[in-house]
Image: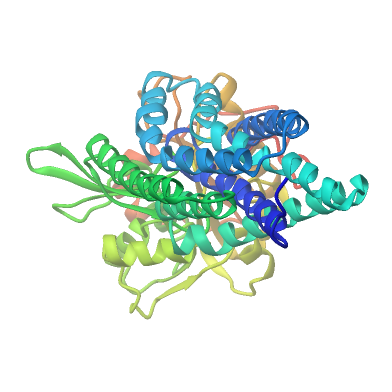
């Protein structure tokens, strides 16, 4: 066995450990527009990658016991580099294809997609640790110490990869560039540890490098052809975001903002008007509280409603809490948000945190932070609503949009939230945005929580007659309230 260069294996183990966690975070971002990012999806991704890694550890150990050759280690990393560069192609061919066919079976889509896209690189990278243990054990003849050191280095690499990818790479560099960089880094690592390199290995490395770059380019081309309506594909600290131009008819098109699978905002490009019907229900604050002048909105997205708000209530004030600062930048660039308006203040922080610690008071609180059936549970609980009530002036109202069904398994969001609002507020009203929707169809509902007895604005009642008539006056539920200790809804 040839003499190993000092610390070569340690560096290799560290990098491979880091790359494993980078790929795990990338997996969630790649899959999120097709299957979402709920706990079930994360569980599927993590489970599949752990299965592949377990197999990799087992096979790597078997190979290490049979022979000791750095060529094997190099080739495994080499294969992981190539398979990583295939992810953009598989995203469109496998993930997008399966999501279109199995739109109601997202867990199956997630498991299958994670296996195809990330199974091979996860497997190959996992073989590195047992092979490295065998090499170092022969050098140092202390199996416990060697095993502990290699495992520790792999774990430290994983920790570094997690923080560096999550806090720096994904929001600043983007997933596609991470995939390209990871493929090249793994190729360079494989080349460097290959023993007794000759001109053949140099040529192979150059050909592989060119192939990786071409595969990434082909992947982007295939993606663009499959999604011609996407004009911007962005990664932030919190989400993968697609900005689209969607043509509805010859003279009707919408600019949309999609986060994960959810359509967060869309605006009529011809008129600039907001497209989502549920947003008009936020105007009911004018009816339920005649003296309302100040508004807090939790969840900005493309800032569709704030733009409408200032167009119609230009003397009022609004504070918007949007956790994702990059989302606000997208709203400015793509959706013409005017941040110079003196009556608009924007806070980039978590909505629950703002409710807990802010000293500001409002006449109206609007909540638009729920992504489909998967909601941040901390904004759904009794404790959160009590904090919202504290932030209200006397006779204020909270108006919340949520997505649920009226009956069936997916109706629990509406049922638990209605029970929670009934427990927290003095009066609660619920509206069904789409009256003709089937009872088991996922749809928008509006909850209005009222503090005290605000003076109704009868002067505008006729203006909102079409909205008011959609109130479900006989709605009731026996479901338990959602609390910070027990939240049966959300992700």
**Residue at 43% from the left image edge and 39% from the top image edge:** 87
In front of the other: 394 or 255: 255
In front of the other: 311 or 31: 31
In front of the other: 181 or 476: 181
Q: Is residue 248 above or below residue 153?
A: above
Query: Where, quadrant-wise, is the N terminus in this rendering?
Result: top right
Specify whether 362 is left or right of 218. right
Q: Within the image, what quadrant is residue 408 found in?
A: top right
Q: Determine if residue 375 is in view.
A: no
Specify whether 144 is left or right of 45. right
Query: Where, quadrant-wise, is the C terminus in this rendering?
Result: top right
Specify whether 45 is left or right of 275. right
Q: Is residue 296 above or below residue 126?
A: below
Q: Is residue 162 above or below residue 475?
A: below
Colour pattern: rainbow
**Residue at 90% from the left image edge and 52% from the top image edge:** 145
Percent across and percent down for residue 325 are 47, 66
Percent across and percent down for residue 100 are 36, 24
Percent across and percent down for residue 384 are 67, 54
**Residue at 60% from the left image edge and 41% from the top image edge:** 71
In front of the other: 10 or 3: 3
Percent across and percent down for residue 279 are 37, 48
Q: Determine if residue 458 is in view.
A: yes
């Amino acid at each position: 066995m040839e003499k190993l260069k000092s610390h070569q294996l340690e560096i290799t183990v560290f990098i491979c450990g880091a790359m494993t966690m980078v790929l795990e975070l990338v997996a969630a971002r790649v899959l999120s527009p097709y299957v979402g990012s709920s706990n079930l999806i994360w569980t599927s991704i993590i489970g599949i990658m752990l299965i592949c890694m377990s197999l990799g550890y087992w096979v790597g150990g078997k190979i290490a016991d049979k022979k000791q050759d750095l060529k094997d280690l190099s080739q495994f990393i080499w294969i992981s580099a190539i398979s990583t560069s295939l992810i953009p192609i598989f995203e469109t061919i496998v993930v997008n294809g399966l999501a279109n066919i199995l739109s109601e079976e997202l867990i199956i889509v997630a498991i299958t997609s994670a296996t195809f896209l990330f199974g091979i690189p996860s497997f190959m990278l996992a073989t590195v640790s047992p092979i490295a243990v065998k090499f170092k054990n022969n050098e140092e003849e202390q199996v416990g110490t060697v095993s502990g050191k290699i495992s520790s280095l792999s774990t430290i690499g994983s920790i570094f990869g997690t923080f560096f990818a999550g806090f720096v790479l994904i929001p600043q560099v983007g997933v596609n560039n991470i995939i390209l960089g990871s493929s090249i880094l793994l190729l360079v690592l494989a080349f460097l540890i290959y023993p007794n390199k000759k001109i053949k290995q140099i040529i192979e490395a150059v050909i592989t490098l060119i192939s990786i770059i071409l595969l990434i380019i082909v992947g982007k081309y295939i993606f663009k052809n499959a999604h011609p309506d996407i004009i911007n594909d962005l990664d932030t600290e919190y989400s993968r975001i697609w900005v689209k131009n969607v043509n509805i008819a010859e003279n009707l098109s919408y600019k949309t903002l999609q986060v994960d699978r959810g359509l967060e905002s869309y605006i009529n490009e011809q008129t600039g008007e907001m497209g989502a019907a549920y947003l008009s229900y936020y105007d009911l604050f004018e009816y339920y509280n005649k003296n309302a002048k100040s508004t807090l909105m939790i969840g900005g997205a493309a800032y569709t409603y704030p733009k409408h708000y200032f167009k119609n209530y230009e003397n009022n004030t609004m504070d918007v809490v949007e956790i994702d600062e990059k989302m606000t930048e997208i709203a400015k660039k793509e959706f013409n948000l005017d941040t110079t308006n003196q009556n608009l203040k924007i806070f980039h922080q978590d909505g629950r945190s703002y409710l807990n610690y802010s000293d500001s008071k409002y006449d109206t609180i609007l909540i638009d932070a729920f992504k489909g059936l998967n909601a941040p549970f901390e904004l759904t609980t009794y404790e959160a609503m009590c904090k919202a009530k504290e932030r209200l002036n006397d006779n204020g109202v909270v108006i919340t949009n949520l997505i649920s069904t009226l009956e069936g398994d997916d109706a629990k969001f509406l049922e638990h939230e209605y029970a929670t609002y009934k427990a927290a507020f003095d009066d609660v009203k619920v509206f069904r945005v789409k009256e003709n929707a089937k009872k088991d169809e996922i749809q928008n509902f509006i909850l209005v929580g009222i503090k005290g007895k605000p003076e109704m604005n009868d002067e505008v009642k006729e203006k909102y007659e079409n909205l008011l008539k959609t109130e479900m006056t006989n709605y009731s539920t026996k479901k338990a309230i959602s609390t910070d200790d027990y939240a049966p809804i959300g992700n």
